[in-house]
Amino acid sequence: MEQSLVIAMVGMLGIGAQWLAWRTGWPAIVLMLAAGFLAGPVFGLFDPEHAFGELLDPMVAIGVALILFEGGLSLDLRELRHAGEAVWRLVILGGPIAWVFGAFAAHSIGGLEWPVAILFAGILVVTGPTVVMPLLRQSSVKSRPAAILKWEAIVNDPIGALFAVVAYEYFRAVTASPGSGLFEVVPPLIFAAILAGVIGYVAAAAIAWAFPRGTVPEFLKVPVLLTAVIVVFVLSNQIEHEAGLVAVTVMGVALANMNVTSLRSIHPFKQNVAVLLISGIFILLSSSLKFEELAYLNWNFGLFLLALLFLVRPATILLSLLGSSVPWNERLFLAWIAPRGIVLVAISGLFALRLEEIGYDGTALIGLSFAVVVVTIVAHGFTIDLVAKLLNLKGSNRPGIIIVGSTPWTISLAMMMKELKAPVMVVDASWQRLALARQNGLPFYHGEILNEATEHNLDLTPYAVLVAATENEAYNALVCNEFAYEIGRDTVFQLGDAVDEDDRHSLPSSIRGRALFESGFGVEDVNERLSRGWVFRKTKLSDEFDFEAARERLPDAAAMLLLLRENGTIRFFTHAARPEPRAGDVIVSFAPPQERTAQDAAAKRERKRSKTAEQGT
């Protein structure tokens, strides 16, 4: 009974912290740390070690393996063409440099004994993709430095784990056989890592061969994939401790680059699994903290944290990128941003107990790793915007709109959004149809929006809204359904309204985007009105001139399309939802060409008063 209660509480706290982070914009990992710490050592609501006993260690280990696999599965090697040189330098040169400098700082400044300092410094090489990517999304950093940070975080996760394995195995061998040397321990570990990588690649190749050929039914693909990851992880760990982390990362990256089309259908599920695992593992580890483990957080370790931020990371970046083509402003940006996340804490938790088994005091690692996570996330998370702005690496921070389909109506809409200084991008596979966009100086992308190559050639980060408005309603629905998982179901729109669900000739609303316009205008409707001279109008609201007053100024037939808030947020008027206009908003409407006179407005108000009076009687 206790275990089921603990599982329920862990789920509630983890997902609750993620939801609160979404609502407030605060770093989710800090909120999860606070939730777990309050539930565990502060209020004593539960103790994971007491509840799960020996199962806790393998549970965390398998969770970390699945997180690394999911991260690798989201990476396409074609992205490296923008940041390949820098990433390889940061992995091949930066990893060992960070390990050496970090070990010296942990021992001489942090006061850790050499074996613990060396192992901890190896783990500190990781920079945490689960933290880096959300920071990049909310800060709108330019594409190249963002790509470098993203790839460094993913690739260095298994590298940091491998460094920790090398250190642990060396000290374990020295403890067992005091005469063992470095060259007797390291080559077998490197061979084990290579062998683990081969196992991961072979497993990926087997799945890539089997899935498209129908040897695994659709309903079993996700279970088979998750089981394969766990089997590869456990099997590789039999070769060498934690070699499984290398194997599952290689497996994920290999699968991502084998063009297995059937994997696209499991992307939403794997993302959900990653969120659940990250939430659960972090709550479990933070609630397992003991107050005695926090006793190591003294002024010595405070100085170590400062050295980590201002000496180790800058030296790693500047030495690794010396002589590279990366501009200096990007090098300085990379030298500052290095938040740590769940993998650091999870791997530290795994090795803390194992160090004790070979005679070293590893109890400090869990508390120290949490301190590093909190300090780096707070320091980097709350300064990334400022640093990017000072170094001229800030992209547009106003949410933009992607318009799929180049037609006279969409070009008119794009020109209005450009006039309102909202980022806009017109996408069409026809160069001929894009002539309108080119003639009007609008940003455009020539290509099929559904092609996988688009995500590597078109940076979708600045865009928070998608409008599919081609002349094919089914194609528009397909585009909206495809991007709903990436942009959000509530922010993909198309022309036309969902018809009666009982009509077997209509597309179901579950696969369509939200309908533009409250009236549900379709493609033919807007084109016909455009031919009659209808235009887009913008109206700025104020305390004196509210939404009702703006509506009075427009013709009766005018249709409200969207409102643009002062911070750039875009909200659409649809058949299902109507945003609440307020002072400072700009209303965009689609209206007939004639200007309304003062007499027309007065007559309209009089009609409205008469209608209200009739309803009252």
Image (tube, grey):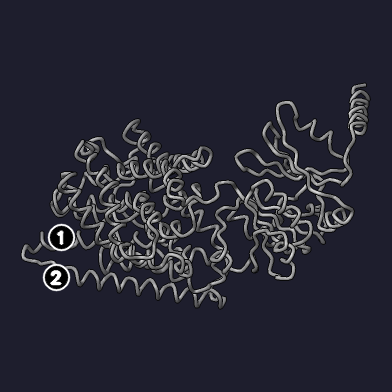
Where is residue 130 shown, x and y percent of the image?
A: 42, 52
Question: Extreme top residue here?
Answer: 617
What amino acid is found at the position of numbered circle 2 in the picture?
Phe
Where is residue 353 shown, x and y percent of the image?
A: 22, 50
Picture residue at 63% right of the left edge, 66% below the top:
450
Q: Which residue is mark 2?
A: 183
Q: Is residue 407 above or below residue 293?
A: below
Where is residue 84 shown, x and y percent of the image?
A: 41, 67
Are circles 2 and 1 on residues that touch, CB within 8 Å? no
Residue 403 as seen in the image, left or right of residue 296 = right
The residue closer to the viewer here, 538 or 116, is 538
The residue closer to the viewer here, 145 or 195, is 145
The residue closer to the viewer here, 516 or 415, is 415
Of the two numbered discs 2 and 1 in the rendering, the one whose residue sits closer to the viewer: 2
Q: Secondary structure at mark 1?
A: helix
The answer to which quarter of the image holds residue 36 is top left
Q: Is residue 1 visible?
A: no
Number of the label disc, if any, that sits on residue 172: 1
Q: Secondary structure at mark 2?
A: helix
The residue closer to the viewer here, 524 or 566, is 566
Number of the label disc, if any, that sits on residue 442: none
Where is residue 586 shown, x and y percent of the image?
A: 70, 39
Residue 538 as seen in the image, left or right of residue 107 = right
Question: Extreme left residue here?
Answer: 179
Q: Is residue 441 above or below residue 56?
A: below
What amino acid is found at the position of numbered circle 1 in the picture?
Arg
